[in-house]
Amino acid sequence: MRLRVLQWVTAAALASAAALPARAADVVIGVGDWPSARATAHLVKAIAETRLGATVELRSGATAELWEAAGAGEIDILPEIWLPNDRAQVARHVDRTHAVTLLPRGVPARQGLCTTQQAAEEFGIRSVDDLSSRKTAELLDTDADGTGEIWIGAEGWNSTRVEQIRAKSYGYDRTMTLIEADEPVAMAGIDVAAALGEPIVFYCYEPHHMFALHDLVMLDEPGHDPTTWTIRSPDEDPDWLANSTASTAWAVSFIHMAHRTGLETEQPEVTDMLARMDLQPDAIEAMTYALIVERKEPDVFAREWIAANADRVNGWLGQ
């Protein structure tokens, strides 16, 4: 699996942030760089255009970049806000400045570290504690540098920063190299490892199409204890990593939608629709499967989904 780590490192080295262009539509939707965010953004766009007559622009960016644009009034809708991941941005843009309105409905989600069922059974990789062992480090060492490799997320994800903190808090940062790379590159490495029966450990979140593709299990770890979590962001503390801890599992997570405060008076039909949208985990997983595995174009998929779920969409529109 040398190819896998080389792909991860290459992707991380080539990653760069793109400047966000000026707004040019009735509604601008921010699109995060993970599959479910793209699927949801295209779905909202298609409904707003075909059923509400709005002109919609999609604007891609990293998490912090999209939040800053929303806070500045340059983006109207953030279709996927992960909590507790986006805690710092919510505190700033929702609670403090009130520039963004967070919708209360949340979709249940899970986060943690995964391996394949085969790796758990054949190689005994079952617990976060196993990651600190020399044996596991050797099993996950794909470039013969003496440490294992774990993909912890894409550069710019809030969860990636938290996974750095978790690795330091548990101590496996001493036995593992923490890889930051774009998700498609990591998913390709996981596909290869699963096909070849090789051991692999990586950051995972659900809902996600990977759970439909492969037999995955989350590593065991102590249940979430909020007293063991102190998460600092770079904006709050230049020495954020040293001053943060997270030595138990992630808390139960939720995916929310948010919109620019004021959009409810400018585009009330759009914000009313957002407030009624109820996408459950199985629907989100099916959406990402269609985009990534079946390779459907997002705009085509969105229109097909709307046609196949007309009653549900009508309910979101109050019809």
Image (cartoon, rainbow, N blue to C red):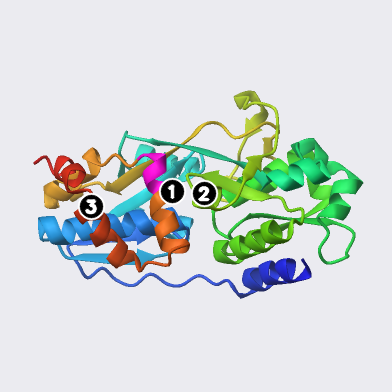
How would you rate the neighbour count of disc 1 (Cα within 10 Å): few for under 14, some for 14-19, many for 20 or more? many
Give the residue drawn at x 19%, y 45%.
273
Residue 113, image x, y percentages: 66, 44
Residue flagged by tag 1: what amino acid is it?
Answer: Glu
Residues in magenta, as a range: 280-285
Q: Is residue 68 visible?
A: no
Under circle 2, the secondary element is: helix
Q: Nearer the viewer, mark 1 or mark 2?
A: 2
> Which residue is the site of mark 1?
285
Residue flagged by tag 2: what amino acid is it?
Answer: Ala
Tell me: residue 154, above or below residue 235.
Answer: below
Return the residue nearer the eye: 74 or 188. 188
> Which residue is the site of mark 2?
212
Return the residue nearer the eye: 250 or 97. 250
Task: Locate residue 218: give its quadrant.
Answer: top right
> Which residue is the site of mark 3?
308
Give the residue drawn at x 60%, y 66%.
185
Compare marks 1 and 2 and give the one earlier in the sequence.
2
Q: Which mark is residue 242?
A: none
- Magenta region includes residue 282: yes
Residue flagged by tag 3: what amino acid is it?
Answer: Ala
